[in-house]
Amino acid sequence: MKELIRRPTAISMIAALVLVPSLPLGAQVQDKPANRASPPLRTMLQKGYPELFELAPSMHYDPLEIQRLRDTFQSGEKACRNTFKSHGKFYQKQIDGARGTLKSGGDRLPAGERHSLHCTIQNYDLLKSETDVLAGHAIPTAYDNLNAKLDLIQQWPEQYRQTQADLASGAYATRRWGDVKDIGFREIAPGQRDDIKRGQQAVDEMRRMGLLPPALENKQIQNYVEGVAQRVALHSDLKVPLHLTILNSREINAFALPGGYLFIERGLLEAVDDESELAGVIAHEIAHDTARHSAKMMKRATIASIFYQAAQVAAVILTGGVASIGMYYALQYGFYGLGLVLDLKLLGVSREYELEADQLGIQYEWNSGYDPTGFTRFFDKMATREGYINGVSWFRTHPPFYQRMVQAQREILFLPRQKETTLPTEPFQVMKRELVPISQAAEEEEKGKPSLLLTREEGCVAPKKVEYKPEQPIEDLCSAPRRVAEP
């Protein structure tokens, strides 16, 4: 996303983050001697979560140093958000001014002047939507990630020792859903079959209202992803048939509807680096169904209300094209296509549900013969890797990063060691190659689409400068002073 007025010491540290090898499956936990020559704290924050879990027990840092960095983050986030809030206020002032002129001019305004005012309002609305997303969601998410790493460095050593003690005493076996040897024969939540009709109704209604991007028509990709999904479903607690649809959308997202209806978007397939990451995301979504999270949330928010909200943006983000730079991402972060509408209203509202899906999903991935760190590695990548700004909405309604990552890591360590886990496969590489021309064709098609899909006034020139450029890393947002964009 962007840059802002503040010291470059906070978000800019994310830039060097890279994905690191996962922890060995079922690793024996044992105390690690403290290393007096611990790397600089800022160096540690450049590492991904998997490596931090491995290194933190042997590191030691002065609590005062950690607190000073927290204070820096707090002031940095405040300054960063305030910059974009001030931009938003400026844009709103321009909008109000143009609207005032329209009102005072009435029917007397010349057609050309009226058109110009309409374009001004339209473009400043676009820019303001970007600042709202940045200040309200993207920037806080980046700082949440940094603070979570500080939490891990400070708190994981003790929790690691507690994990070791739980393993030694056998206490880990008494955790909720600790009966992993009975996966498939246990009941996580009764009534899964009752959800089939509700899920089918939801899918039919979405299609009727045009809320679903087009399906991805490629037999090799469909068969491959279907095979991974059915393998995970077979080794899960799912009691209903799994129906998989791949959507030809650039969003990095997957979601499940009640009754075994699973949707995976093309952007997710492009983002995963190996089969276990894909299996981990699929397992997480299947877990939402086995625990009947979506059905439970539907009791609080009716399908009708969800679709009414979704319909307001359907023509913009679910037509297969991109909006102008800012509008696309503003709507993606504000609604995140189907993902946010469904996650926010059905799945993501409850932090408890997300933690449950993490635990069950890791168990299902492990039981399917995959490396159970697949989901957490993908989570880490979405949270920290440069360029993965598309994933910000994954975390908007989820539990705090640290809580989520620690509970997932403990679950991984509690699982029995597997003799062998699935490594990257040739079919996975074939799937990735098949995606290339499809993505290129979609990008070419998008180039011909209007720059503003929310266009109410035709013939407007899009803003020359925007608050955010697609694929721009969020760590760039606060690295330099920034001036408001002018349409």
Image: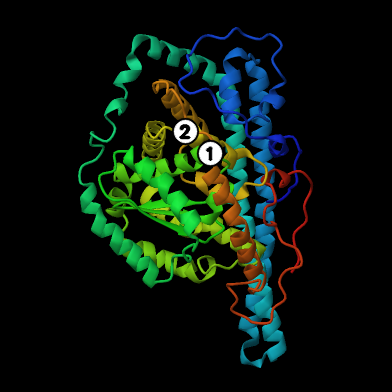
Q: Residue 354 at x, y = what percent?
A: 40, 40
Q: Are marks 2 and 1 in contact (CB under 8 Å)?
A: yes
Left or right: 220 in relation to 127: left
- Does residue 418 sit above or below 282 in this rendering? above
How far from the left and from the top, in percent, is residue 49?
58, 29
> Is 457 placed left or right of 24 in the picture?
right
Q: Please, which residue is most extreme toward the front here?
A: 426
Question: Callout 1 environment at 10 Å: few (<14), some (14 to 19), or many (20+)?
Answer: many
Q: In the picture, residue 41 is in which quadrant?
A: top right
The residue located at (33%, 67%) in the rendering is 204
Figure check: 392 above or below 331: above
Question: Which amino acid, mark 1?
Answer: Phe
The answer to which of 276 and 337 lies nearer the viewer is 276
Q: How is the image coloured?
A: rainbow
**Which quadrant of the figure has residue 479?**
top right
Residue 292, by quadrant, is top left
Q: Which residue is mark 2?
A: 404
Q: Position of residue 149 (x, y in %)?
A: 59, 29
Tag in front: 2 or 1: 1
Looking at the rendering, in which quadrant would you find the C terminus?
A: bottom right
Q: Residue at x 35, y 18 (%)?
A: 172
Does residue 397 appear to the left or right of 303 in the view shown? Answer: right
Whether residue 375 appears in this view of the structure is yes
Q: Nearer the viewer, residue 72 or 377?
A: 377
Looking at the image, residue 220 lies above or below residue 310: above
Mark 2, Cα crowd under 10 Å, few <14 / some 14-19 / many 20+, is: many
Q: Which residue is mark 1?
A: 379
- Which SS class for mark 2? helix
